[in-house]
């Protein structure tokens, strides 16, 4: 039997976009942050798990050079400032500020990828040298994939906001993108300590 | 900023499948094969996900029959050890990765949005992408198997057996990439389900009123999110050890074989519950409907589900008792493995109380649930036995373990799943399955299952190891193996009865109507099968069993019919918050899945496949997300 319905309200006055937990996109970002955060946690666990199998850590006694890793960390942290600015610009729907800041975020992305390239040359190990080298490279590659993904994600968004103009959904997308960038930035802090400083403290 | 456009005149539907022509046009797929390829309708994708999962179930079942035929008598020459290795590896891999997890998510892909009272799943294009990735991964591993490069090291592929010294060639590489395919697909669906359940529930469907099936899928989805990265990491480490010379699992260069076991079982044990928890939700739906009363102790049931999901992550080491771990660790995992029996028992007692205090109608879905009670409780009891280290060490890698996990997995998941098929089939198709054939299906399955697997307890106790392709005469194993093989053929006949029942119902089954079981949840409020838009107006919910009210069903109007719009509500109280446009059908999820398939398969042969394969993938993803001018779902048309 088909049940009759009784209309008891109307939702046509509701906004058709929102921010943060109001928006569906934010929940998608949250889901992928949880997945990828879990992958980082497990990779860190694998790193720590493998430590007791070597008499010295790193086995070759040369931890990664601090220069590029630290430079990357400083630039990454610096990028959080424009990232927060663009997030708030999106929240107050400030179109000129979003257009300006998204270009700055792209510049930061390019700079970070270049520094990351140099970082790989200064790890003082190779992935196929021993398990230490394998896990260090694994963590670095894992983080670089996240960095590259978010950088790549930012580029078409920048084209959209400059070419198409920005509607509410794009402001919401910009905010979501900023949330993900914060994840990439702050997860690196933990990895930086693990890869660059833990071996030094242990020695 | 776009300015507000004038709203179309509100439709006033008389019932939930009474949408306007414009609404039907807006949610319709393109006609024909192109529409089939590009659809983002959760019902069409859910149906094809279910059908694909069932095809893999049948294929894995055929492998099981082949294995049982080989073992029916001692020193049988039907196949040699290498073929047998591939058979049990493909059987386990297909059942776990291509049937059990995907089909639970598949049922949810179909049912969850309807049960929430919304018009589509969150992230519908991701949903389409997920299906294609799953399909291509499954097809890849089966083609590899057909070309004699199927997996050979079991469904958990332990190193060093799985490293390149002991498993040369590409067999294990295909297995490892199949893992990546299926986990990408499962993780995508998990994110969709979390967002759908938390953000698209009908107004008034507070967490306290949320059906237990939605609770079970919410918890399962979070378990997928936290467990599956582990196996992706593990299989990536495995394939890089094999292909580019990393040393994660190589003890000679600082690696450790047990790292594989930790990473695998950190996923592998929750995996059992990822299969089992959705089944708990299905059981609750069936028990409630066929007992004609709300499930007894709803809050305790929710807490039991949450507790089960939580404890599931604390048990993985009980798969590793034989690896020589510290005694304190063993004791902890023994205790944890026993504790998880408590929330399971809470649920079993609550269902029994529901049936006992209701007016039970023993239709086929409820029969499968009763079968679940018997089989799962037996499997649970042997689970508690195996949690004890001394006993575990005695029966480790014997048929006792094979018996245990089939009791838990088939009893705990496949019986409820079949019950769920009988329950929701009228909604999926608009037709009813035959009850007579259903009862034959159930009893053949129940008897066949026990005839197959109960003797395996004894075979294990008298020392028959698992994964042997044959055994000598005079071991005392002949009779019990023969009985198990007879049981396996009974199960096959039961599956055949099910297939015939489905085909007959699709051709000439009795029309089901909207709510043939007089069930209380929202998926039964609309037509069977539901229209593309699911609900012409958005249901409002005032109780945990909204359809058992005698009044007209309350609903909210005001969603646009000229674009694919849904209502988003608050995560806990389900208060209306904003409306949200969903994207139209697109072929780009398919192209993206094809590009990802090329990348994954290429990477089996060269690491540069990851680099060059990323380019077409990036292009396809960009076009997927690029809002086309006519896709108004992706554009805000209101100012704040």
Image (spheres, coloured by chain):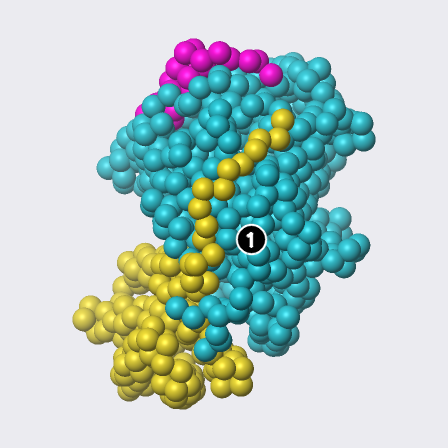
Chain colours: A yellow, B cyan
Magenta residues span B341-363
Q: Chain of mark 1?
A: B
The residue depicted at 63 percent of the width and 41 percent of the height is B17
Quarter holding the C terminus of chain B is bottom left
- The percent coordinates of residue B276 (x first, y second) are 48, 33
Prevailing secondary structure of the magenta residues:
helix
Front one among B286 and B382: B286
Quarter holding the N terminus of chain B is bottom left
Front one among B252 and B237: B237
The residue depicted at 32 percent of the width and 33 percent of the height is B303
Kindly identify which residue carries mark 1.
B10
**In this view of the protein, can residue B143 be seen by the observer?**
yes
Judge whether B197 appears above or below A86 on screen: above
- The percent coordinates of residue A176 (x first, y second) are 40, 68
| Residue placed furthest toward the front | B9
- Secondary element type, mark 1: loop
Residue A60 appears in which quarter of the rendering? bottom left
Asked if residue B348 is among those painted magenta in the image, a careful observer would answer yes
Judge whether A87 appears above or below B541 on screen: below
Q: Residues within 10 Å of mark 1 (few under 14, many from 20)?
A: some
Front one among B158 and B620: B620
Judge whether B547 appears above or below B600 on screen: above
Asked if residue B511 is among those painted magenta in the image, a careful observer would answer no
Front one among A121 and B111: B111
With B335 as the anchor, is A203 left or right in this view? left
The residue depicted at 38 percent of the width and 18 percent of the height is B349
The residue depicted at 68 percent of the width and 18 percent of the height is B435
- The percent coordinates of residue B307 (x first, y second) are 32, 35
Judge whether A89 appears above or below B484 on screen: below
């Amino acid at each position: 039997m088909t049940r009759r319905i009784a209309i008891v309200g109307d939702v046509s006055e509701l906004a058709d976009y929102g921010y943060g937990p109001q928006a569906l996109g934010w929940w998608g970002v949250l889901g992928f942050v949880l997945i990828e955060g879990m992958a980082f946690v497990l990779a860190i666990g694998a790193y720590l798990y493998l430590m007791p199998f070597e008499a010295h850590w790193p086995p070759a006694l040369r931890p990664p050079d601090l220069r590029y890793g630290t430079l990357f960390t400083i630039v990454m942290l610096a990028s959080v400032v424009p990232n927060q600015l663009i997030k708030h610009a999106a929240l107050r729907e400030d179109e000129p500020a979003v257009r300006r800041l998204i270009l700055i975020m792209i510049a930061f992305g390019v700079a970070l990828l270049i520094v990351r390239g140099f970082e790989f040359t200064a790890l003082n190990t190779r992935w196929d040298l021993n398990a230490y080298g394998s896990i260090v490279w694994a963590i670095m590659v894992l983080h670089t994939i996240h960095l590259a993904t978010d950088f790549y994600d930012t580029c078409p968004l920048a084209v959209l906001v400059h070419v198409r103009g920005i509607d509410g959904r794009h402001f919401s997308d910009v905010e979501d993108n900023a949330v993900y960038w914060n994840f990439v930035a702050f997860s690196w802090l933990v990895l930086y300590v693990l890869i660059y400083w833990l071996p030094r403290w242990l020695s | 900023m776009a300015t507000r456009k004038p709203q179309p005149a509100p439709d006033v539907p008389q019932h939930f499948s009474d949408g306007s022509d414009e609404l039907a046009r807006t949610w319709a797929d393109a006609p024909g094969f192109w529409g089939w390829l590009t659809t983002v309708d959760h019902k069409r994708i859910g149906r094809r996900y279910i059908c694909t999962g069932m095809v893999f179930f049948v294929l894995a079942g055929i492998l099981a029959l082949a294995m049982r035929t080989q073992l029916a008598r001692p020193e049988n020459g039907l196949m040699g050890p290498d073929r047998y290795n591939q058979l049990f590896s493909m059987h386990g891999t297909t059942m776990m990765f291509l049937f059990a997890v995907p089909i639970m998510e598949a049922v949810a892909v179909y049912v969850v949005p309807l049960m929430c009272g919304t018009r589509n799943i969150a992230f519908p294009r991701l949903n389409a992408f997920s299906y294609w990735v799953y399909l291509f991964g499954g097809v890849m591993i089966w083609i590899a198997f057909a070309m004699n490069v199927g997996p050979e090291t079991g469904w958990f592929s332990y190193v060093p057996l799985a490293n390149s010294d002991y498993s040369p060639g590409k067999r294990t590489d295909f297995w490892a990439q199949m893992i990546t395919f299926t986990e990408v697909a499962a993780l995508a669906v998990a994110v969709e389900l979390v967002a759908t359940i938390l953000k698209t529930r009908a107004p008034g469907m507070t967490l306290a009123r949320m059906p237990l099936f939605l609770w079970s899928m919410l918890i399962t989805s979070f378990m997928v999110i936290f467990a599956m990265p582990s196996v992706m990491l593990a299989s990536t480490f495995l394939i890089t050890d094999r292909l580019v010379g990393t040393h994660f699992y190589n003890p000679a260069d600082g690696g450790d074989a047990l790292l594989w076991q930790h990473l695998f079982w950190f996923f592998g044990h929750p995996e059992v519950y990822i299969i089992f928890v959705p089944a708990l939700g299905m059981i609750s739906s069936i028990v409630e409907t066929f007992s004609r009363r709300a499930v007894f102790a709803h809050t305790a049931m929710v807490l039991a589900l949450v507790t089960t999901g939580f404890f599931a992550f604390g048990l993985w080491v009980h798969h590793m008792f034989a690896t020589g771990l510290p005694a304190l660790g063993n004791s902890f995992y023994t205790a944890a493995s026993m504790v998880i029996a408590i929330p399971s028992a809470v649920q079993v007692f609550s269902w029994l109380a529901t049936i006992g205090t209701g007016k039970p109608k023993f239709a086929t879905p409820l029969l499968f649930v009763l079968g679940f009670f018997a089989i799962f409780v037996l499997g649970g009891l042997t689970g508690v036995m195996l949690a004890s280290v001394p006993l575990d060490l005695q029966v480790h890698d014997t048929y006792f373990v094979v018996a245990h996990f089939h009791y838990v997995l088939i009893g705990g998941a496949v019986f409820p799943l079949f019950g769920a098929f009988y329950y929701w089939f009228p909604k999926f198709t608009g037709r009813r399955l035959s009850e007579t054939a259903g009862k034959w299906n159930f009893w053949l399955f129940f008897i066949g299952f026990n005839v197959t697997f109960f003797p395996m307890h004894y075979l294990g106790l008298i020392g028959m190891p698992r994964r042997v392709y044959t055994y000598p005469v005079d071991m005392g194993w002949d009779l019990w193996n023969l009985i198990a093989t007879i049981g396996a053929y009974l199960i096959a006949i039961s599956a055949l009865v099910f297939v015939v029942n489905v085909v007959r119902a699709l051709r000439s089954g009795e029309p089901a109507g909207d709510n043939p079981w007089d069930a209380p949840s929202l998926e039964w409020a609309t037509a069977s099968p539901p229209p593309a838009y699911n609900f012409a107006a958005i249901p409002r919910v005032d109780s945990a069993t909204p359809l058992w009210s005698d009044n007209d069903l309350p609903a909210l109007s005001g969603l646009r019919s000229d674009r694919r719009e849904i209502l988003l509500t608050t995560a806990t109280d389900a208060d209306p918050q904003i409306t949200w446009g969903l994207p139209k059908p697109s072929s780009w999820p398919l192209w993206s899945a094809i590009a990802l398939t090329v990348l994954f398969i290429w990477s089996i042969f060269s690491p540069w496949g990851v680099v060059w394969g990323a380019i077409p993938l990036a292009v396809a993803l960009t076009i997927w997300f690029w809002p086309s001018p006519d896709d108004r779902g992706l554009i805000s048309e209101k100012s704040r």
